[in-house]
Image (cartoon, rainbow, N blue to C red):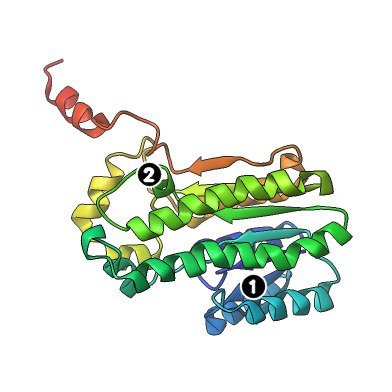
């Protein structure tokens, strides 16, 4: 039985559907209940088991209700995918210059991305312990490791998720609970495309080592592995699933251009 937050679209939707396709009963949790109901309906139409549930990660009571309802419906919790994040266009567009940072923008990033992840974990862990263990997978981000010219609040909140991941793994390992983080690069969801120009997308793609764009199923495959017994001895890890964008020299794309221009 798995809970996936932020599962009403994009990465969370792909993860919920892939887990369900492999036999998990899935709670499709999202602040966007319409999206969650659509995803849960599509899972059930394909022969899987799913339940949509509203959750607001900024409200601990909402989180507690979601977890209690999930346990009442399915009896246990084996997998938690903390995927939801505050990535709305308004939030991300205001997350720019540190010198002009509105504290409300900074606090909003941490309230959902970090505090929300901690609170869902807090309420799920007792049920995992009662069931003999489980797997927690946090969605972090490649920007949690490297500096950039934009989105410092988002980056810092995701770096905190990395630290939370390692602490969760350390505290709960003896209870047979594993915790790992997935660090996506740019996953070209409709939301991401709407927020970026074609020139920005092309620039980022020039730095990806593999010859294609990332899609949500790339992240879902890693989540499935960590949720399954194939990842049974993996915990406390910060795993990049980004096509290698964070694993080369900063002049990689420029070198490719120079080499392409050389005769022979």
Q: Is residue 120 at all visible to an observer of this figure?
A: yes
Tell me what residue is drawn at x 81 percent, y 59 percent. 128
Instruction: Please identify the residue farthest to the top as the structure is shown.
Output: 264
SS of the residue under disc 2: loop
Relative image position of residue 158 (x, y in whole percent): 47, 54
Image quarter of residue 83: bottom right
Q: Quadrant of the N terminus?
A: bottom right
Q: Residue at x 26, y 53 (%)?
A: 201
Q: Which residue is denoted by mark 1 in the rendering? A: 28
Q: CA distance from mark 1 to mark 2?
A: 29 Å
How many marks are shown on the rendered structure? 2
48 is higher (above) or lower (below) than 185: below
Badge number at residue 90:
none
Query: Could you tell me if residue 222 is visible in this image?
Result: no
- Figure quadrant of the C terminus: top left
**Residue 40, horizontal then vertical, whole percent:** 64, 76
Percent x, y of residue 39: 59, 74
Out of 81 and 68, give the one closest to the viewer.
68
Q: With 200 as the anchor, is 42 left or right in this view? A: right
Whichever of labels 1 and 2 marks the residue nearer the N terminus, that label is 1
Q: Residue at x 81, y 63 (%)?
A: 126
Query: Which is more toward the observer, 28 or 117?
Result: 117
* Residue furthest bottom as drawn: 34
- Residue 105: horizontal and vertical position, in percent? 35, 70
Tell me: residue 95, above or below residue 74: above
Q: Are marks 1 and 2 in contact (CB under 8 Å)?
A: no
Name the residue located 62 percent from the left edge and 74 percent from the top edge. 29
Give the labeled residue for mark 2. 212
Q: Indicate whether 212 appears above or below 140.
A: above
Residue 237, above or below 196: above
- Left or right of 163: which side holds 201? left
């Amino acid at each position: 039985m798995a809970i996936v937050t932020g599962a009403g679209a994009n990465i969370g939707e792909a993860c919920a559907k892939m887990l369900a396709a492999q036999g998990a009963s899935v709670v499709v949790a999202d602040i966007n209940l319409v999206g969650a109901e659509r995803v849960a309906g599509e899972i059930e139409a394909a022969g899987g088991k799913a339940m949509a549930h509203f959750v607001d990660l900024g409200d601990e009571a909402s989180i507690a209700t979601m977890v209690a309802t999930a346990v009442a419906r399915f009896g246990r919790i084996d997998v938690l995918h903390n995927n939801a994040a505050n990535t709305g266009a308004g939030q991300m567009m205001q997350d720019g210059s540190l010198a002009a940072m509105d504290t409300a923008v900074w606090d909003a990033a941490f309230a959902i991305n970090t505090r929300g992840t901690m609170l869902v974990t807090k309420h799920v862990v007792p049920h995992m312990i009662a069931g003999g263990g489980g797997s927690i997978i946090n969605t972090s981000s490649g920007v949690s490791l490297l500096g950039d010219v934009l989105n410092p609040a988002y980056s810092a909140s995701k770096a905190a998720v990395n630290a939370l991941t390692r602490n969760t793994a350390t505290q709960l390992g003896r209870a047979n609970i594993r915790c790992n983080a997935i660090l996506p690069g740019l996953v070209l969801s409709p939301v991401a495309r709407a927020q970026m120009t074609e020139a920005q997308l092309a620039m980022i793609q020039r730095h990806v080592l593999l010859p294609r764009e990332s899609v949500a199923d790339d992240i879902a495959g890693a989540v499935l592995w960590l949720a399954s017994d194939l990842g049974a001895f993996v915990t406390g890890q910060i795993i990049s699933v980004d096509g290698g964008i964070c694993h080369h020299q900063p002049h990689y794309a420029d070198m490719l251009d120079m080499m392409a221009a050389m005769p022979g």
